[in-house]
Protein backbone atom coordinates (compact mmCIF):
# COMPACT_ATOMS: atom_id res chain seq x y z
CA UNK A 1 0.00 0.00 0.00
CA UNK A 2 2.86 2.42 -0.77
CA UNK A 3 1.06 4.12 -3.65
CA UNK A 4 -1.13 6.75 -2.01
CA UNK A 5 -3.06 7.21 -5.27
CA UNK A 6 -4.13 3.57 -5.62
CA UNK A 7 -7.87 2.88 -5.27
CA UNK A 8 -7.47 0.81 -2.11
CA UNK A 9 -5.16 3.32 -0.44
CA UNK A 10 -7.52 6.22 -1.15
CA UNK A 11 -10.53 4.18 0.05
CA UNK A 12 -8.79 3.50 3.37
CA UNK A 13 -7.60 7.10 3.67
CA UNK A 14 -11.16 8.39 3.21
CA UNK A 15 -12.46 5.94 5.81
CA UNK A 16 -14.68 4.04 3.37
CA UNK A 17 -13.14 0.66 4.27
CA UNK A 18 -10.36 -0.89 6.31
CA UNK A 19 -6.91 -1.99 5.24
CA UNK A 20 -7.89 -5.60 6.02
CA UNK A 21 -10.84 -5.38 3.61
CA UNK A 22 -8.56 -4.10 0.85
CA UNK A 23 -6.10 -6.93 1.55
CA UNK A 24 -8.96 -9.46 1.25
CA UNK A 25 -9.74 -8.09 -2.22
CA UNK A 26 -6.08 -8.35 -3.21
CA UNK A 27 -6.07 -11.99 -2.05
CA UNK A 28 -9.10 -12.62 -4.29
CA UNK A 29 -7.14 -11.13 -7.20
CA UNK A 30 -4.23 -13.49 -6.49
CA UNK A 31 -6.54 -16.54 -6.49
CA UNK A 32 -8.18 -15.44 -9.75
CA UNK A 33 -4.78 -15.12 -11.44
CA UNK A 34 -3.80 -18.59 -10.16
CA UNK A 35 -6.92 -20.01 -11.83
CA UNK A 36 -6.06 -18.27 -15.10
CA UNK A 37 -8.90 -15.79 -14.70
CA UNK A 38 -8.41 -12.09 -15.37
CA UNK A 39 -8.68 -10.52 -11.90
CA UNK A 40 -11.24 -7.86 -11.14
CA UNK A 41 -10.11 -4.48 -9.93
CA UNK A 42 -10.03 -3.75 -6.21
CA UNK A 43 -12.79 -1.17 -6.66
CA UNK A 44 -15.05 -3.69 -8.39
CA UNK A 45 -14.54 -6.22 -5.62
CA UNK A 46 -15.22 -3.66 -2.89
CA UNK A 47 -18.45 -2.72 -4.67
CA UNK A 48 -19.52 -6.35 -5.16
CA UNK A 49 -18.95 -7.10 -1.50
CA UNK A 50 -21.05 -4.09 -0.53
CA UNK A 51 -18.15 -2.56 1.36
CA UNK A 52 -18.35 0.76 -0.52
CA UNK A 53 -21.16 2.49 -2.39
CA UNK A 54 -21.25 3.83 -5.96
CA UNK A 55 -21.09 7.36 -4.59
CA UNK A 56 -18.02 6.49 -2.53
CA UNK A 57 -16.38 4.91 -5.58
CA UNK A 58 -16.92 8.13 -7.55
CA UNK A 59 -15.34 10.10 -4.71
CA UNK A 60 -12.32 7.78 -4.74
CA UNK A 61 -11.97 8.17 -8.51
CA UNK A 62 -12.08 11.94 -8.08
CA UNK A 63 -9.27 11.94 -5.51
CA UNK A 64 -7.22 9.59 -7.70
CA UNK A 65 -7.67 11.91 -10.66
CA UNK A 66 -6.54 14.90 -8.62
CA UNK A 67 -3.38 13.01 -7.70
CA UNK A 68 -2.66 11.66 -11.17
CA UNK A 69 -3.15 8.09 -10.06
CA UNK A 70 -5.46 7.05 -12.88
CA UNK A 71 -7.16 8.15 -16.06
CA UNK A 72 -10.81 7.26 -15.67
CA UNK A 73 -12.86 9.48 -17.95
CA UNK A 74 -16.59 8.97 -18.41
CA UNK A 75 -17.46 8.01 -21.97
CA UNK A 76 -13.94 6.95 -22.92
CA UNK A 77 -11.89 3.77 -22.62
CA UNK A 78 -8.17 4.47 -22.42
CA UNK A 79 -6.14 1.92 -24.39
CA UNK A 80 -2.55 3.15 -24.44
CA UNK A 81 -0.21 5.99 -23.56
CA UNK A 82 1.00 7.94 -26.59
CA UNK A 83 3.41 10.35 -24.99
CA UNK A 84 3.99 13.25 -22.64
CA UNK A 85 3.70 16.93 -23.45
CA UNK A 86 4.51 20.12 -21.57
CA UNK A 87 1.09 20.15 -19.90
CA UNK A 88 0.44 16.48 -19.25
CA UNK A 89 -0.03 13.06 -20.81
CA UNK A 90 -1.59 12.11 -24.12
CA UNK A 91 -3.42 8.78 -24.43
CA UNK A 92 -5.09 6.83 -27.17
CA UNK A 93 -8.64 6.02 -26.19
CA UNK A 94 -11.95 4.86 -27.62
CA UNK A 95 -14.91 7.21 -27.51
CA UNK A 96 -17.50 4.67 -26.42
CA UNK A 97 -20.59 6.39 -27.84
CA UNK A 98 -19.10 6.66 -31.35
CA UNK A 99 -16.80 3.60 -31.16
CA UNK A 100 -13.93 5.59 -32.65
CA UNK A 101 -10.33 6.18 -31.63
CA UNK A 102 -9.43 9.56 -30.15
CA UNK A 103 -6.40 11.22 -28.63
CA UNK A 104 -6.96 12.28 -25.02
CA UNK A 105 -4.84 15.09 -23.67
CA UNK A 106 -4.91 15.02 -19.86
CA UNK A 107 -3.74 18.00 -17.81
CA UNK A 108 -1.22 16.97 -15.17
CA UNK A 109 -2.52 17.20 -11.57
CA UNK A 110 0.30 19.61 -10.69
CA UNK A 111 -0.80 22.08 -13.39
CA UNK A 112 -4.51 21.46 -12.73
CA UNK A 113 -3.99 23.14 -9.35
CA UNK A 114 -3.00 26.36 -11.17
CA UNK A 115 -5.88 28.39 -12.60
CA UNK A 116 -3.60 29.88 -15.28
CA UNK A 117 -2.79 26.47 -16.73
CA UNK A 118 -6.39 25.31 -16.52
CA UNK A 119 -7.42 28.40 -18.50
CA UNK A 120 -4.70 27.73 -21.09
CA UNK A 121 -5.86 24.11 -21.36
CA UNK A 122 -9.45 25.09 -22.02
CA UNK A 123 -8.34 27.94 -24.28
CA UNK A 124 -6.83 25.38 -26.62
CA UNK A 125 -10.12 23.51 -26.70
CA UNK A 126 -12.05 26.70 -27.46
CA UNK A 127 -9.59 27.65 -30.19
CA UNK A 128 -9.81 24.24 -31.84
CA UNK A 129 -13.61 24.29 -31.59
CA UNK A 130 -13.67 27.43 -33.73
CA UNK A 131 -11.79 25.72 -36.54
CA UNK A 132 -12.94 23.06 -38.98
CA UNK A 133 -10.31 22.27 -41.59
CA UNK A 134 -8.76 19.06 -42.95
CA UNK A 135 -5.26 20.32 -42.10
CA UNK A 136 -6.04 21.10 -38.44
CA UNK A 137 -6.48 18.48 -35.72
CA UNK A 138 -10.21 18.39 -34.96
CA UNK A 139 -11.42 18.88 -31.40
CA UNK A 140 -14.13 16.54 -30.11
CA UNK A 141 -14.82 17.08 -26.43
CA UNK A 142 -13.46 18.83 -23.35
CA UNK A 143 -14.32 18.63 -19.68
CA UNK A 144 -13.50 17.36 -16.21
CA UNK A 145 -14.23 13.75 -15.23
CA UNK A 146 -13.31 12.08 -11.94
CA UNK A 147 -10.96 14.93 -11.13
CA UNK A 148 -9.22 14.77 -14.52
CA UNK A 149 -9.15 17.72 -16.93
CA UNK A 150 -9.25 16.23 -20.42
CA UNK A 151 -9.42 17.29 -24.04
CA UNK A 152 -10.46 14.72 -26.65
CA UNK A 153 -9.16 15.25 -30.18
CA UNK A 154 -9.05 13.52 -33.53
CA UNK A 155 -6.60 10.62 -33.37
CA UNK A 156 -3.90 10.72 -36.03
CA UNK A 157 -2.04 7.52 -36.80
CA UNK A 158 1.30 8.98 -37.78
CA UNK A 159 4.24 11.03 -36.59
CA UNK A 160 5.37 14.62 -36.46
CA UNK A 161 7.68 16.45 -38.85
CA UNK A 162 9.82 17.12 -35.79
CA UNK A 163 10.28 13.40 -35.16
CA UNK A 164 11.34 12.86 -38.76
CA UNK A 165 13.81 15.76 -38.65
CA UNK A 166 15.30 14.40 -35.43
CA UNK A 167 16.50 11.38 -37.39
CA UNK A 168 18.78 13.72 -39.34
CA UNK A 169 18.95 15.08 -42.86
CA UNK A 170 16.82 17.42 -44.93
CA UNK A 171 13.50 16.67 -46.60
CA UNK A 172 13.23 16.47 -50.34
CA UNK A 173 12.12 19.95 -51.43
CA UNK A 174 8.96 18.75 -53.16
CA UNK A 175 7.89 16.79 -50.10
CA UNK A 176 8.58 19.74 -47.81
CA UNK A 177 6.66 22.03 -50.16
CA UNK A 178 3.57 19.77 -50.07
CA UNK A 179 3.60 19.85 -46.27
CA UNK A 180 4.11 23.61 -46.02
CA UNK A 181 1.27 24.26 -48.48
CA UNK A 182 -1.10 22.26 -46.29
CA UNK A 183 -0.08 24.07 -43.11
CA UNK A 184 -0.33 27.43 -44.90
CA UNK A 185 -3.90 26.44 -45.81
CA UNK A 186 -4.52 25.67 -42.13
CA UNK A 187 -3.14 29.09 -41.17
CA UNK A 188 -5.35 30.80 -43.73
CA UNK A 189 -8.37 29.13 -42.14
CA UNK A 190 -7.15 30.22 -38.72
CA UNK A 191 -6.62 33.76 -40.03
CA UNK A 192 -10.17 33.87 -41.35
CA UNK A 193 -11.28 32.96 -37.84
CA UNK A 194 -9.08 35.66 -36.24
CA UNK A 195 -6.75 33.20 -34.54
CA UNK A 196 -2.95 33.24 -34.24
CA UNK A 197 -1.31 29.91 -33.35
CA UNK A 198 1.90 31.42 -31.86
CA UNK A 199 3.85 28.14 -31.79
CA UNK A 200 4.04 26.79 -35.34
CA UNK A 201 6.97 24.37 -35.51
CA UNK A 202 7.84 20.90 -36.88
CA UNK A 203 6.80 19.24 -33.60
CA UNK A 204 3.30 20.66 -34.08
CA UNK A 205 2.86 19.33 -37.60
CA UNK A 206 1.43 15.80 -37.70
CA UNK A 207 1.68 13.59 -40.79
CA UNK A 208 -0.97 10.91 -41.30
CA UNK A 209 0.81 7.61 -42.03
CA UNK A 210 -1.35 6.19 -44.83
CA UNK A 211 -2.12 9.46 -46.65
CA UNK A 212 0.69 11.88 -45.89
CA UNK A 213 -1.85 14.57 -45.01
CA UNK A 214 -0.31 17.26 -42.78
CA UNK A 215 -2.25 18.54 -39.77
CA UNK A 216 -1.48 21.48 -37.52
CA UNK A 217 -1.87 20.64 -33.83
CA UNK A 218 -1.34 21.97 -30.29
CA UNK A 219 -3.20 25.26 -30.08
CA UNK A 220 -2.48 25.56 -26.38
CA UNK A 221 -0.97 29.05 -26.71
CA UNK A 222 -3.16 30.26 -29.57
CA UNK A 223 -4.75 33.67 -29.17
CA UNK A 224 -8.08 34.80 -30.59
CA UNK A 225 -8.10 38.32 -32.00
CA UNK A 226 -10.82 40.88 -32.46
CA UNK A 227 -11.33 41.46 -36.20
CA UNK A 228 -8.83 44.03 -37.43
CA UNK A 229 -7.04 44.24 -34.09
CA UNK A 230 -3.59 42.81 -33.34
CA UNK A 231 -3.26 40.54 -30.32
CA UNK A 232 -1.30 41.40 -27.23
CA UNK A 233 1.64 39.26 -26.19
CA UNK A 234 1.45 37.78 -22.68
CA UNK A 235 5.19 37.30 -22.27
CA UNK A 236 7.56 35.45 -24.58
CA UNK A 237 5.46 32.61 -25.97
CA UNK A 238 6.81 30.25 -28.62
CA UNK A 239 9.81 28.04 -29.35
CA UNK A 240 13.23 29.76 -29.74
CA UNK A 241 14.17 28.08 -33.04
CA UNK A 242 10.98 29.24 -34.77
CA UNK A 243 9.80 32.28 -32.80
CA UNK A 244 9.24 35.56 -34.63
CA UNK A 245 11.18 38.73 -33.73
CA UNK A 246 8.00 40.47 -32.57
CA UNK A 247 7.24 37.61 -30.20
CA UNK A 248 10.69 37.91 -28.69
CA UNK A 249 10.24 41.66 -28.26
CA UNK A 250 6.80 41.34 -26.70
CA UNK A 251 5.08 43.30 -29.43
CA UNK A 252 1.51 42.98 -30.64
CA UNK A 253 0.97 39.92 -32.81
CA UNK A 254 -0.97 39.02 -35.92
CA UNK A 255 -0.97 36.19 -38.47
CA UNK A 256 2.42 37.31 -39.82
CA UNK A 257 4.06 35.85 -36.71
CA UNK A 258 2.77 32.41 -37.75
CA UNK A 259 4.06 33.00 -41.30
CA UNK A 260 7.52 33.64 -39.84
CA UNK A 261 7.38 30.47 -37.75
CA UNK A 262 6.20 28.44 -40.72
CA UNK A 263 9.08 29.89 -42.73
CA UNK A 264 11.53 28.80 -40.02
CA UNK A 265 9.96 25.33 -40.11
CA UNK A 266 10.26 25.25 -43.92
CA UNK A 267 13.91 26.30 -43.58
CA UNK A 268 14.57 23.45 -41.14
CA UNK A 269 12.91 20.94 -43.43
CA UNK A 270 14.86 21.85 -46.58
CA UNK A 271 18.24 22.42 -44.93
CA UNK A 272 18.17 19.84 -42.13
CA UNK A 273 18.76 22.46 -39.44
CA UNK A 274 16.87 25.26 -37.74
CA UNK A 275 17.79 28.77 -38.99
CA UNK A 276 19.84 30.10 -36.06
CA UNK A 277 20.55 26.94 -34.09
CA UNK A 278 24.29 26.58 -33.61
CA UNK A 279 24.04 24.78 -30.30
CA UNK A 280 23.44 27.90 -28.23
CA UNK A 281 20.89 28.32 -25.47
CA UNK A 282 17.36 29.46 -26.20
CA UNK A 283 17.96 33.07 -25.19
CA UNK A 284 20.85 33.42 -27.63
CA UNK A 285 18.79 31.90 -30.43
CA UNK A 286 15.93 34.32 -29.74
CA UNK A 287 18.35 37.25 -29.87
CA UNK A 288 19.52 36.04 -33.28
CA UNK A 289 15.93 35.89 -34.49
CA UNK A 290 15.77 39.62 -33.73
CA UNK A 291 19.12 40.89 -34.99
CA UNK A 292 21.16 38.34 -36.98
CA UNK A 293 20.86 38.19 -40.78
CA UNK A 294 19.40 34.97 -42.15
CA UNK A 295 21.70 32.76 -44.21
CA UNK A 296 19.58 31.83 -47.27
CA UNK A 297 18.65 28.13 -47.26
CA UNK A 298 20.23 27.48 -50.68
CA UNK A 299 23.56 28.64 -49.23
CA UNK A 300 23.24 26.03 -46.48
CA UNK A 301 21.95 23.34 -48.86
CA UNK A 302 22.82 23.89 -52.55
CA UNK A 303 20.06 21.43 -53.54
CA UNK A 304 17.44 23.98 -52.47
CA UNK A 305 16.03 25.85 -55.47
CA UNK A 306 16.30 29.62 -55.74
CA UNK A 307 12.52 29.85 -55.73
CA UNK A 308 12.16 27.92 -52.46
CA UNK A 309 14.96 30.01 -50.96
CA UNK A 310 13.19 33.21 -52.04
CA UNK A 311 9.90 32.13 -50.49
CA UNK A 312 11.49 30.99 -47.23
CA UNK A 313 13.55 34.16 -46.89
CA UNK A 314 10.53 36.36 -47.54
CA UNK A 315 8.51 34.44 -44.94
CA UNK A 316 11.28 35.15 -42.42
CA UNK A 317 11.85 38.85 -43.06
CA UNK A 318 12.44 40.51 -39.71
CA UNK A 319 10.22 43.54 -40.47
CA UNK A 320 6.69 42.19 -40.69
CA UNK A 321 5.74 44.54 -43.49
CA UNK A 322 8.30 42.81 -45.76
CA UNK A 323 6.88 39.31 -45.25
CA UNK A 324 3.89 37.76 -46.97
CA UNK A 325 1.03 39.62 -45.32
CA UNK A 326 -1.43 36.71 -45.19
CA UNK A 327 -1.25 32.94 -45.69
CA UNK A 328 -3.37 33.48 -48.83
CA UNK A 329 -0.60 35.66 -50.29
CA UNK A 330 1.97 33.02 -49.37
CA UNK A 331 -0.09 30.24 -50.95
CA UNK A 332 -0.01 31.98 -54.34
CA UNK A 333 3.78 31.59 -54.52
CA UNK A 334 3.86 28.16 -52.89
CA UNK A 335 1.33 26.70 -55.30
CA UNK A 336 2.98 28.37 -58.30
CA UNK A 337 6.29 26.80 -57.29
CA UNK A 338 4.62 23.41 -56.86
CA UNK A 339 2.86 23.61 -60.24
CA UNK A 340 5.55 25.29 -62.36
CA UNK A 341 8.78 24.30 -60.59
CA UNK A 342 10.00 27.90 -60.28
CA UNK A 343 8.79 31.43 -59.61
CA UNK A 344 8.87 34.01 -62.44
CA UNK A 345 10.75 37.30 -62.25
CA UNK A 346 12.25 37.41 -58.80
CA UNK A 347 15.61 38.32 -57.35
CA UNK A 348 17.69 35.77 -55.48
CA UNK A 349 17.39 36.28 -51.72
CA UNK A 350 20.03 38.30 -49.95
CA UNK A 351 20.76 38.18 -46.23
CA UNK A 352 18.55 40.51 -44.23
CA UNK A 353 20.23 43.64 -42.89
CA UNK A 354 20.83 43.57 -39.15
CA UNK A 355 18.95 45.96 -36.94
CA UNK A 356 20.92 49.18 -36.60
CA UNK A 357 22.49 49.64 -33.16
CA UNK A 358 20.42 51.81 -30.87
CA UNK A 359 17.23 51.56 -32.92
CA UNK A 360 14.02 50.04 -31.70
CA UNK A 361 11.18 48.68 -33.88
CA UNK A 362 7.86 50.47 -33.52
CA UNK A 363 5.76 49.12 -30.67
CA UNK A 364 8.84 47.65 -28.96
CA UNK A 365 8.68 47.24 -25.21
CA UNK A 366 11.89 48.55 -23.69
CA UNK A 367 11.80 46.16 -20.74
CA UNK A 368 11.86 43.08 -23.00
CA UNK A 369 14.86 44.21 -25.04
CA UNK A 370 16.64 45.59 -22.01
CA UNK A 371 16.52 42.22 -20.28
CA UNK A 372 17.60 40.48 -23.48
CA UNK A 373 20.58 42.79 -23.98
CA UNK A 374 21.64 42.60 -20.37
CA UNK A 375 21.72 38.81 -20.42
CA UNK A 376 23.61 38.76 -23.73
CA UNK A 377 25.98 41.60 -22.82
CA UNK A 378 24.88 43.40 -25.99
Image: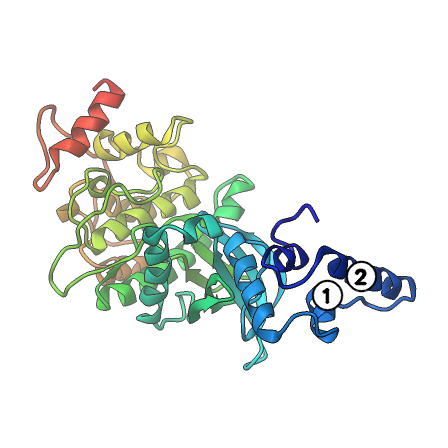
Q: Is residue 166 left or right of residue 259?
A: right
Residue drawn 31% across and 27% down?
Answer: 284
Residue drawn 21% across and 21% down?
Answer: 374
Residue drawn 10% across and 37% down?
Answer: 361
Of 152 and 209, the residue lying toward us: 152
Number of the label disc, if any, that sits on residue 100: none
Outermost right residue: 35
Q: Quadrant of residue 222?
A: bottom left
- Measured as percent of width and height from the top left, residue 334 is found at 31, 58
- Measured as percent of width and height from the top left, residue 96 is found at 58, 78
Number of the label disc, if any, that sits on residue 24: 2
Q: Is residue 239 left or right of residue 366?
A: right
- Measured as percent of width and height from the top left, residue 256 is found at 21, 52
- Measured as percent of width and height from the top left, residue 21 is found at 75, 61
Number of the label disc, if any, that sits on residue 41: 1
Element under label 1? Answer: loop
Residue drawn 63% across and 64% down?
Answer: 16
Element under label 2? Answer: helix
Amino acid sequence: MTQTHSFGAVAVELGFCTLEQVKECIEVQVKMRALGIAPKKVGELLLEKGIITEEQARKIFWVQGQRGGHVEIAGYRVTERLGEGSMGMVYKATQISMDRPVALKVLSPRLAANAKFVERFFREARAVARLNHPNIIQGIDVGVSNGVHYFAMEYVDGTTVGNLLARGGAFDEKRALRIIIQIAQALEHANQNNLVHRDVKPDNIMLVSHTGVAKLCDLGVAVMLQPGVAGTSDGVVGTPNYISPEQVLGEELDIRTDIYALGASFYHMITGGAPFDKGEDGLTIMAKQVKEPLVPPNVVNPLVSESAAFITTKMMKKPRDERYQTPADLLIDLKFLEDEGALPNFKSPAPAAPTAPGTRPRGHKRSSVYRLKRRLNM
